[in-house]
């Protein structure tokens, strides 16, 4: 015991510095948020490096380089949760970039991975956009750090509608008409909108499914847009400092329009599907 004690003391002393380095233990925490102070997407602002440490950019080869196509969220060191519609009609090779904020300034924790498998939900329907969810298995795990952390997927027991501090993030278009993507990650606070309101006649008129979430603003102006798909809608847990990955950016009528908020796939409805795909629920598979 005597010989181990100094090591334990050393470990305890180093704890603050080691706590988040190469450790993918606890999901939903934002180690850099406390560092920066808490604080297109259309109508958002530039996110600080590491502000949303689970977000990844899903890219594919374009000519000699690579291009961003969708967002995604790390839910384990080797699995990314994203949208099925990102992968329709293309048989290309995909890559995942983790730990980045600016595409032109990758930073110390940037990590590129190949996609080993793409698992689309079998019920995904391109016309109705139902079951717009997919999982990507990476060829190698990412290393967690200050700017790379896992998102928490809630099960059916979470009362999502009660959560009020909700945020979207992504490298999608910052203006509805111009297709230009920003170089830096954008973030915006959004509000969850009751599905009955969202489905009412002057809004989406019945197009929204029970496994969707609507989030944004009745008056528009702030919203996810093309290129944000697959990325995270997160809400802070009640009386706690971690976030739940409650939605995957799916679609919307245009971007930031009045009574046309963003539509998200509700992750808690697919909790079991996610576990089965990841091989964590073999008896149900
Ligand atoms: C898209 O095309 C897209 N305003 C994503 C989000 C929204 C609209 C379109 C929501 O990827």
Image (spheres, helix red, strand yellow):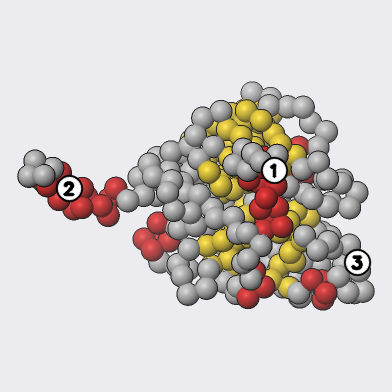
Q: Quadrant of the N terminus?
A: top left
Q: How far separated are the C-alphas under marks 3 and 2? A: 59 Å
Q: Which circle, 3 or 1, is nearer the viewer?
A: 1
Q: Is residue 239 above or below residue 209?
A: below
Say which residue appears at 61% left-offset and 67% top-offset: 158
Q: Nearer the viewer, residue 180 or 276?
A: 276
Is disc 1 placed on a helix, strand or loop?
A: loop
Point out the tag, 3 or 2, that comes first from the N-terminus: 2
In which quarter of the view is residue 225 placed?
bottom right
Judged from this view, the residue extending furthest toward the front is 283
How many residues crowd mark 3 within 10 Å: few (<14), some (14–19), many (20+)? few
What residue would you read off at disc 3? 206
Say which residue appears at 70% left-offset and 52% top-offset: 270
Quick check: can you spot residue 71? Answer: no
Say which residue appears at 75% left-offset and 53% top-offset: 250
What residue would you read off at disc 1? 284
Q: Which circle, 2 or 1, is nearer the viewer?
A: 1
């Amino acid at each position: 015991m005597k010989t181990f004690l100094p090591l334990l003391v050393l470990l305890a002393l180093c704890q603050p510095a080691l706590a988040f380095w190469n450790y993918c233990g606890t999901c939903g925490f934002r180690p850099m948020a406390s560092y920066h102070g808490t604080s297109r997407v259309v109508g958002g602002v530039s996110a600080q490096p590491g502000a949303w440490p689970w977000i990844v950019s899903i890219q594919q080869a374009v000519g000699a380089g690579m291009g961003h196509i969708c967002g995604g969220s790390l839910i384990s060191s080797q699995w990314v949760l994203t949208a099925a519609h990102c992968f329709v009609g293309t048989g290309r090779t995909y890559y995942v970039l983790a730990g980045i904020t600016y595409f032109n300034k990758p930073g110390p924790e940037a990590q590129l991975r190949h996609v080993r498998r793409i698992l689309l939900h079998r019920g995904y329907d391109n016309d109705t956009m139902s079951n717009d969810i997919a999982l990507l298995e990476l060829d190698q795990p990412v290393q967690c750090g200050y700017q790379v952390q896992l998102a928490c997927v809630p099960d059916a027991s979470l009362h999502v509608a009660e959560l009020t501090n909700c945020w979207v993030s992504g490298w999608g278009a910052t203006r509805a008409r111009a297709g230009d993507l920003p170089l830096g990650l954008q973030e915006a606070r959004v509000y969850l909108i009751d599905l009955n309101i969202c489905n009412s006649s002057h809004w989406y008129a019945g197009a929204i499914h029970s496994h969707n979430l609507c989030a944004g603003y009745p008056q528009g102006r702030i919203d996810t847009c093309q290129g944000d798909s697959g990325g995270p809608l997160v809400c802070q847990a009640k009386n706690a400092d971690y976030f739940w990955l409650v939605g995957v950016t799916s679609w919307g009528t245009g971007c930031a329009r009045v009574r046309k908020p963003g539509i998200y796939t509700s992750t808690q409805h697919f909790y079991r599907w996610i576990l089965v795909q990841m091989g964590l629920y073999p008896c149900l598979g």
